Image (cartoon, grey):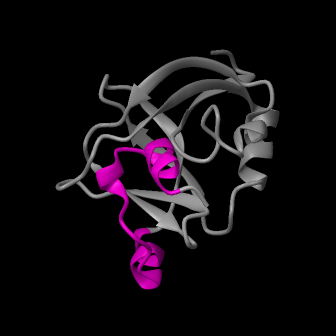
């Protein structure tokens, strides 16, 4: 990582093989990774996008990918995220803390979006429930 790049954790629709992967541009895939089991995963807006938040207990470990991305690519990624999503820290099982795109728990509960944590990740959910 340099002053011109940052490392991010991707665990949703921008994963390799998912429809929004193109939003990562020329980002470099560094490794597969998992979060600590302190998050919940929901299907926002009738399953069109993942929504994750930290819960502390009764959470799951969310699989994803770590990318090195330029600051320009990062800004492009953020601009193309749905409303209300925001960058925040996420804790990986190897102890690394990276930026990920999160969703406010209050809105998930307000809209009563389904908890899809039992699927074990966004790609597994989409494979079982293609929309």
User: Residue 92 at x, y = what percent?
Assistant: 36, 32
Q: Quadrant of residue 48?
A: bottom right
Answer left or right for 120 relative to 17: left
Answer left or right for 13 relative to 62: right
Q: Quadrant of residue 130?
A: bottom right
Q: Quadrant of residue 17?
A: top right
Q: Nearer the viewer, residue 127 or 11?
A: 127
| Residue 106 lies within the magenta run | yes
Q: Which residues are magenta?
A: 105-129
Quadrant of the snapshot with the N terminus: top right
Answer left or right for 28 relative to 105: right
Residue ID at (52%, 50%) = 126
Residue ID at (47%, 82%) = 111
User: Residue 115 at x, y = what percent?
Assistant: 35, 65
Answer left or right for 126 relative to 79: left
Q: Residue furthest left?
A: 57
Residue ID at (42%, 26%) = 33
Magenta-drawn stretch, dominant element (helix, strand or loop): helix
Q: Is residue 111 above or below residue 77?
A: below
Q: Is residue 127 above or below residue 53?
A: above
Residue ID at (78%, 54%) = 79
């Amino acid at each position: 990582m340099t002053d011109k790049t940052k490392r991010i954790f991707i665990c949703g629709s921008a994963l390799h093989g998912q429809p929004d992967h193109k939003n990562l541009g020329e980002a470099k895939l560094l490794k597969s990774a998992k979060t600590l089991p302190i998050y919940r995963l929901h299907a926002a807006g009738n399953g069109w996008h993942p929504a994750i938040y930290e819960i502390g207990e009764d959470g799951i470990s969310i699989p994803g990918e770590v990318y090195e991305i330029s600051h320009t690519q990062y800004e492009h990624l953020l601009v193309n995220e749905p409303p209300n999503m925001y960058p925040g820290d996420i804790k990986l099982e190897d102890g690394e803390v990276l930026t990920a795109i999160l969703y406010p728990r209050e809105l998930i509960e307000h809209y009563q979006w389904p908890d899809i944590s039992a699927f074990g990740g966004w790609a597994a959910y989409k494979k079982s429930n293609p929309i």
